[in-house]
């Protein structure tokens, strides 16, 4: 089917997609008449599937339920979807009165079971266009598997003036995760935003906090999708991903519920659930590897070069599971076992959980921590996936070499240990800093990393015809490419460039500054009359030159920069790392940090140190544990807490350390080649509110750093030196276009900095931007491009300089804020709303509400904070809400209901019934809340039944909806407990 621009104008984009699915992919076209709104299920196709595939089971339920059997099955299915989730129900079905109902059939690993193959072909995959899921609520396309909704699509066509950003906006603002169709885990598994160029998806609707993952193939190792002659750029979604076999494979072998357990600061275990849907590059890598291995068997090598932050852990989980069950066309196992070599405990736990969800069999995954006897035992017991460490790799290779009658898939996780330097000898004699640095550099050169050790072992035993290797790395060395690559190239690539452009990781070179540049800019700002002088610069700009080993001097620069700049990032959660030249340097830095912080009386920052072994200095011996005051294993968790802000490292934590709050790095160590990339990439993880990173390098040449990055990011760029006064030149050039008006900028910024915006504020803020956009639209196309280019340059330089020193120029700041929103309208074609959730509040400024209606500089404050005032604003707090009203509002927000003050009488009625319960009253007065709520839950349903006749709509919802009832029990239990406890 060739789609031309003219054809696309004549037919809606969604019709193009729907017609391909129904005419080529064999989908059934669903209708709104088939859809049951109450249960968010396609009732018609559900029962057609059950009748066609499970007649006997259905007959048993008909005998039990008579004419109500369909309603009873729907009720039971709804209950299990709420309890277990869509993925588990699809894979394992449901039981009703001892009768097992399958909700889907999936492809077996072999074609030997012909009966099952027939059932797989009887799955009913349907697509409904313009599905009305509630009054005034519709969605472009919803895909159902046997009546159960699995995927939903919001489509936009650029020819109509809207794009993928408008689709994402619609998901965030016009749809709710409380709607039954979109409830997390319970119904639709993934929601897609798609236009003819790009695709994004999410597995959880969460209002403005909804996080969309890119689902693009990549173009020239960057973002987006390539042009394919005669097709739309996103054709692969409906032609490939949504083919019948592919969709069933994704639902059966890829999608799973990831459960993480984290201990909070109070010591309580917090469970976090994430529904994992494969990104395009993850599924593509697994499919291509499987296809090659199935065709060619064991004895081959594959290098999967996937950027940091690209989800390698999930890809390894999927690949290991699939390889362990892979059969060729003759229905023979390709591999007897998959062996994963890693040093990451997180992979061990996640792999076991993921495989269990996908296979629902215990014992498939074994961990080898002993000798070759344990390996042999695990193989004899039928373990299909074995996890081991790099330390055990040599004897595993030797053992496998003796098992020539079996084939093995060895998956190598790059997983550079986060605590390197274990083999470094203790510094038992006092050395100078120069001597210590040289000694540690030599030890670092000798110590081979994970990749080198693995390559050495494979070289020792030679490649075996019964073993295939699958190596994962973000930054392969030349030796790695030679050993595992295909003609010295990766078998599959998801580049650092694509990850950065898709905003999945941050570009750490964007704000990389040598000390020479750092000093020059800070000095320029302090001395230049163009800028309003800021006291914050004085702590750094007085250092004309740095002595290589003047640690006290560098300590002052680092701490003052952190407190003036970094500390304001991420809502005060930002962290910094100091990379030191040796373990002795790290010890001296820690002593210097503690001394300086104490002298200054700072109470808002503390530093930790990380180094191996013991260090002797001036007759004293130091260790990491001694200097920090707790064990080595506790360091990552302690550093994540609010208590510590800076981590001083010597070799440790430079690789494999994943701390998303890490924003700033101070480099006081010579870095080159792969080590430079791995070290600086510690900053690249995304985190809510993290827009940028910052590196201040005391010793390296920026050109050397750039050369180190180029092999992994083909067009890496260092911003280099900048001229602060260029901001004023660009400001003048922008004003010459007569687009910007001072009065509009002033009023717009005033609104943006309001603490709470009403409907009128949103309208006015849009209006001020729209007026500028209208004037911009009158320019010639070449002038428009030039204006946007200059506006972007202004924003980049402004943000770059603010990373170095929080200078203050109110006019520049207001222009910066205005241009950020202006570009959202003209460059990204955003829909009519400005996302005011994303306020550009620079961390260097405190926003104060006053009544004068002016913007002033507060000069008596230590760090010159801007105070933006709004006329007419008051400081009166809104009166507290009645508790029962608050409970109703919470229920409505979570469940999409519209119960009003009328239902407050029902809640009050429940309270009165509960107050009369003497047993409950006694429990409240003699037990903590956690014990009380258990008794309250047992009695709650009785209170509801007692009040049912007086308000059937409200109480009917409580009786029928387990989720709604659970929320109400929690809220009401707390309220009743407080009342009874006061008696």
Image: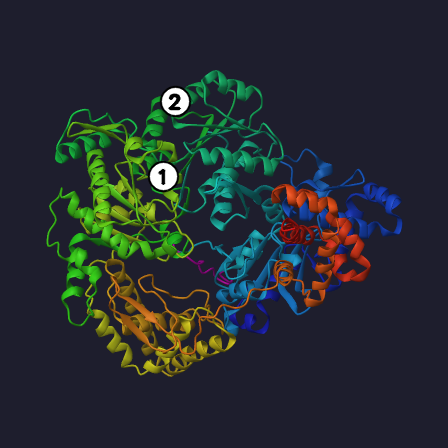
Residue 36 at x, y percent in the picture: 74, 59
Q: Nearer the viewer, mark 1 or mark 2?
A: 1
Q: Is residue 2 above or below residue 401?
A: below
Q: Which residues are magenta?
A: 222-233
Residue 918 in view: yes
Identify the colour scheme used.
Answer: rainbow
Q: Is residue 933 visible?
A: no
Q: Any magenta on residue 83?
A: no
Whether residue 585 sits left or right of residue 127 in the image: it is left
Describe residue 745's horizontal placement relative to residue 32 as left or right: left
Q: Residue at x 25, y 73 (%)?
A: 730
Q: Classify the position of the N terminus by image quarter.
A: bottom right
Residue 877 in percent (x, y) is at 49, 68
Q: In the figure, residue 726 lies in which quadrant?
A: bottom left
Mark 2, secondary structure of its residue: helix
- Residue under circle 2? 394
Residue at 54% across / 42% down in the picture? Answer: 259
Look at mark 1 in the image and give the residue it sits on. Answer: 656
Q: Gap between marks 1 and 2, in whole Å?
A: 22 Å
């Amino acid at each position: 089917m060739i789609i031309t621009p003219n054809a696309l104008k004549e037919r809606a984009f969604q019709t193009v997609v729907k017609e391909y699915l129904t005419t080529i992919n064999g989908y059934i076209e669903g209708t709104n008449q088939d859809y049951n709104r109450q249960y968010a299920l396609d009732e018609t196709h559900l029962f057609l599937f059950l009748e066609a595939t499970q007649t006997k089971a259905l007959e048993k339920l008909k005998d039990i339920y008579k004419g109500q059997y369909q309603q009873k099955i729907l009720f039971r299915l709804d209950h299990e979807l709420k309890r277990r989730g869509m993925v588990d129900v699809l894979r394992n079905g449901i039981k009703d009165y001892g009768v097992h109902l399958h909700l889907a059939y999936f492809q077996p690993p072999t074609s030997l079971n012909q009966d099952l193959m027939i059932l797989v072909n009887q799955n009913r995959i349907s697509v409904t266009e313009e599905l009305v899921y509630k009054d005034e609520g519709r969605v472009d396309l919803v895909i159902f598997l046997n009546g159960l909704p699995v995927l939903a699509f919001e489509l936009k066509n650029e020819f109509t003036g809207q794009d993928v950003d408008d689709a994402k906006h619609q998901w965030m603002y016009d749809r709710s995760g409380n709607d039954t169709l979109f409830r997390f885990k319970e119904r639709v598994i993934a929601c897609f935003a798609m236009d003819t160029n790009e695709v994004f998806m999410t597995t959880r609707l969460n209002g403005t906090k909804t996080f969309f993952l890119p689902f693009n193939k990549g173009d020239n190792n960057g973002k987006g999708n390539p042009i394919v002659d005669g097709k739309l750029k996103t054709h692969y979604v409906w032609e490939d991903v949504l083919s019948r076999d592919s969709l069933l494979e994704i639902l059966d072998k890829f999608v799973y519920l990831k459960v993480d357990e984290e201990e909070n600061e109070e010591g309580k275990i917090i469970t976090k659930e994430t529904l994992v849907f494969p990104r395009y590059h993850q599924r593509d890598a697994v499919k291509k590897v499987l296809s090659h291995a199935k065709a060619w068997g064991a004895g081959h090598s594959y290098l999967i070069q996937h950027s940091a932050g690209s989800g390698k852990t999930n890809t390894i989980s999927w690949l290991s599971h699939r390889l362990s069950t892979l059969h060729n066309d003759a229905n023979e196992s390709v591999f007897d076992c998959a062996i994963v070599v890693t040093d990451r405990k997180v992979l061990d736990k996640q792999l076991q959980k993921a495989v269990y969800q996908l296979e629902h069999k215990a014992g498939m995954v074994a961990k080898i921590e002993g000798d070759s006897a344990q390996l042999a035992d695990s193989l004899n017991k039928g373990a299909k996936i074995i996890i081991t460490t790099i330390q055990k790799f040599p004897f595993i290779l030797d053992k496998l070499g003796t098992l020539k009658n079996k084939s093995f898939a060895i998956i190598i996780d790059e997983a550079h240990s986060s605590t390197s330097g274990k083999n470094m000898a203790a510094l038992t004699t006092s050395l100078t800093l120069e001597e210590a640095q040289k000694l540690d550099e030599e030890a670092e050169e000798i110590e081979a990393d994970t990749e080198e050790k693995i390559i050495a072992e494979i070289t020792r035993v030679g490649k075996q015809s019964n073993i295939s290797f699958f190596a994962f790395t973000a930054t392969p060395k030349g030796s790695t490419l030679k050993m595992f690559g295909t003609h010295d190239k990766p078998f599959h690539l998801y580049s650092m460039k694509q990850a950065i452009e898709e905003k999945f990781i941050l570009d750490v070179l964007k704000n990389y500054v040598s000390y020479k540049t750092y000093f020059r800019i800070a000095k320029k700002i302090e001395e230049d009359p163009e800028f309003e002088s800021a006291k914050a610069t004085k702590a750094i700009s007085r250092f004309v030159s740095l002595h290589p080993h003047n640690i006290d001097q560098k300590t002052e620069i680092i701490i003052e920069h952190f407190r003036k700049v970094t500390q304001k990032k991420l809502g005060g959660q930002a962290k910094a790392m100091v990379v030191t030249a040796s373990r002795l340097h790290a010890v001296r830095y820690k002593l210097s940090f503690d001394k300086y912080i104490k002298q200054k009386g700072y109470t808002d920052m503390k530093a930790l140190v990380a180094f191996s072994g013991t260090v002797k200095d001036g007759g004293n011996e130091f260790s990491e544990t001694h200097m920090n005051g707790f064990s080595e294993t506790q360091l990552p968790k302690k550093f994540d807490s609010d208590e510590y802000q800076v981590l001083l490292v010597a070799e440790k934590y430079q690789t494999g350390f994943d701390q998303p709050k890490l924003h700033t790095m101070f480099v006081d160590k010579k870095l080159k080649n792969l080590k430079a990339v791995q070290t600086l990439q510690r900053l690249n993880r995304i985190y809510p509110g993290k827009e940028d990173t910052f590196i201040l390098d005391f010793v390296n040449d920026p050109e050397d750093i750039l050369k180190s990055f180029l092999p992994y990011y083909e067009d890496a760029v260092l911003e280099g030196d900048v001229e602060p006064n260029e901001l004023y030149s660009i400001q003048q050039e922008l004003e010459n276009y007569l687009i910007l008006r001072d009065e509009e900028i002033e009023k717009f910024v005033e609104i943006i900095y309001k603490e709470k915006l009403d409907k009128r504020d949103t309208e006015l803020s849009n209006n001020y931007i729209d007026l500028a956009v209208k004037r911009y639209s009158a320019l010639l196309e070449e002038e428009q491009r030039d204006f946007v280019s200059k506006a972007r340059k202004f924003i980049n330089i402004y943000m770059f300089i603010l990373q170095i020193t929080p200078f203050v120029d109110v006019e520049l700041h207001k222009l910066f804020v205005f241009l950020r929103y202006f570009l959202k309208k003209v460059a990204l074609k955003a829909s009519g709303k400005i996302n005011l959730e994303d306020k550009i509040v620079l961390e260097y400024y405190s926003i104060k509400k006053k009544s004068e209606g002016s913007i002033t500089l507060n000069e008596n404050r230590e760090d010159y904070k801007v105070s933006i005032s709004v006329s007419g604003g008051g400081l009166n707090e809104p009166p507290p809400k009645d508790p029962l009203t608050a409970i109703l509002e919470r229920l409505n927000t979570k469940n999409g209901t519209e119960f009003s003050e009328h239902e407050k009488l029902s809640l009050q009625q429940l309270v009165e019934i509960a107050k009369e319960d003497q047993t409950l009253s006694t429990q409240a007065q003699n037990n903590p809340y956690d014990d009380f709520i258990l008794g309250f839950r047992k009695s709650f349903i009785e209170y509801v039944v007692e009040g049912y006749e007086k308000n059937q709509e409200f109480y009917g919802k409580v009786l029928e909806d387990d989720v709604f009832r659970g929320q109400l029990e929690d809220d009401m239990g707390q309220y009743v407990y407080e009342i009874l406890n006061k008696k």
